[in-house]
Amino acid sequence: MDLPTKALLYLLLITAGQGLALAVVTGMQKPRHVSFLFLSLFFLLMSLGCVEKSIEGIFYPVRGEELPLPLSMPLAYFPAIYLHLKFLMYPESTFRPWQLVHFLPSFVMDFSSFYLLPWSGNPTGLALTSNMTYTLVFERFYDVYFLGHFLAYTVAIVRFKNGDAIRPEDALKRQWLERMIPVLVVFWASWAVVNFIGKANAFGYLTSFFIHAAVMVSIYWFGYSFLLKMKRPFGAQLSRSRSLGRAAALAIVETIKASGVYKNRKVTLSEVSERVGYSQKAISNAINAAHRSNFNEFINYLRVEAFKQLATDPNNRRLSLFGIAQEAGFSSKASFHRAFKRECGQTPGEYLGAQAK
């Protein structure tokens, strides 16, 4: 092994250590937020890729030999950074376990195929076939899929920058995205060069270091940007987002009221979220802050208020009390009378009788 290659491998190993340290520091950021955890995962995955490449080069210098355990899972890089941005752009969003499906392609193609297809370090084992032709076909399919995968996530990340998640006055998020997107695009382009040009010539093995040089630059760039420029203001911003102000809560409540979505007899929190454009968590927090009640109680409150207005409209005289209640969104007499009595302290008939006097 020549000296420049050896120096690059050891530099790669040192960089991996820096990246692992960044992963720990980022994951421990306070206030604890899921966006920081996914950024920490991103640092961890990239660092493990550097560890794998450097150890293979130092301890397995013969071309083609690999570690018996996969550490590099590049199909997980962009899902991690995408979920980091998603929860950073929408800090009130709630993490759902099903969102981990973003990492399924990585598990299937990066991890499982490592053991199920033949390669130099695992010529038999759990290999599904001993035919190396199938392995070569899979490798080419993987390359094409990888490019499409990275391109799709790059487009999704760019859409964050151009979408409504960033308000004109929110310069912090825009600055973070403007720093991040060029690095991700360069990383994607570098991998394309390595896989479609590097493998096709005699210098393919050495060319593969190019992509890991991009990884090194990315780790230092993200580490510098996050630790020295972004960590503290982001933490303060997320802390503020957790304590919803009364003015913001009232604005959300008024938006729900104006939408009329509560008149749907089977309305759900998810449907209200889609209709008014706020996350489910933000809506729940706003209802609790402005109305001191839960979602169902608040919806019934709006329906009772709608019933009062409809019942005094001369055009609705032909309708029964329950018919008017149905127009307001109630689905049963029992729930209507129960909600009305709780909100007004009297039955609907008693209320309307008192209004008529």
Image (tube, rainbow, N blue to C red):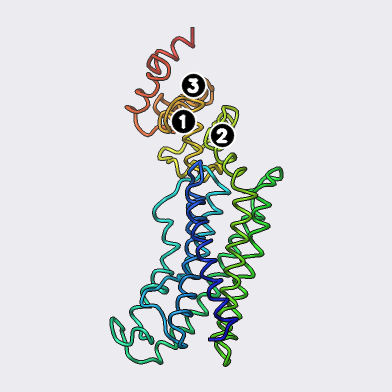
Residue of label 1: 328
Q: Amino acid at mark 2?
A: Ile
For marks 3 and 2, the one nearer the N-term is: 2
- Work out how far the residue at label 3 is from the one at label 2, CA to CA, in angstroms: 22 Å
At which x and y percent is residue 103?
A: 43, 64
Residue of label 3: 308
Q: Secondary structure at mark 2?
A: helix
- The image quadrant that residue 350 belongs to is top left
For marks 2 and 1, the one nearer the N-term is: 2
Q: Amino acid at mark 1?
A: Ala
Q: Amino acid at mark 3?
A: Lys
Of tags 2 and 1, the one toward the viewer is: 2
- Work out how far the residue at label 2 is from the one at label 1, CA to CA, in angstroms: 20 Å
- The image quadrant that residue 221 belongs to is bottom right
For marks 3 and 1, the one nearer the N-term is: 3
Q: Secondary structure at mark 3?
A: helix
Q: Residues within 10 Å of mark 3 (few under 14, many from 20)?
A: some
> With respect to residue 85, does 3 lie above or below?
below
At which x and y percent is residue 80?
A: 50, 60
Residue of label 2: 252
Q: Secondary structure at mark 1?
A: helix
Residue drawn 49% across the image and 24% down it = 305
Q: Are marks 2 and 1 in contact (CB under 8 Å)?
A: no
At which x and y percent is residue 4?
A: 60, 81
> With respect to residue 305, does 207 lie above or below?
below
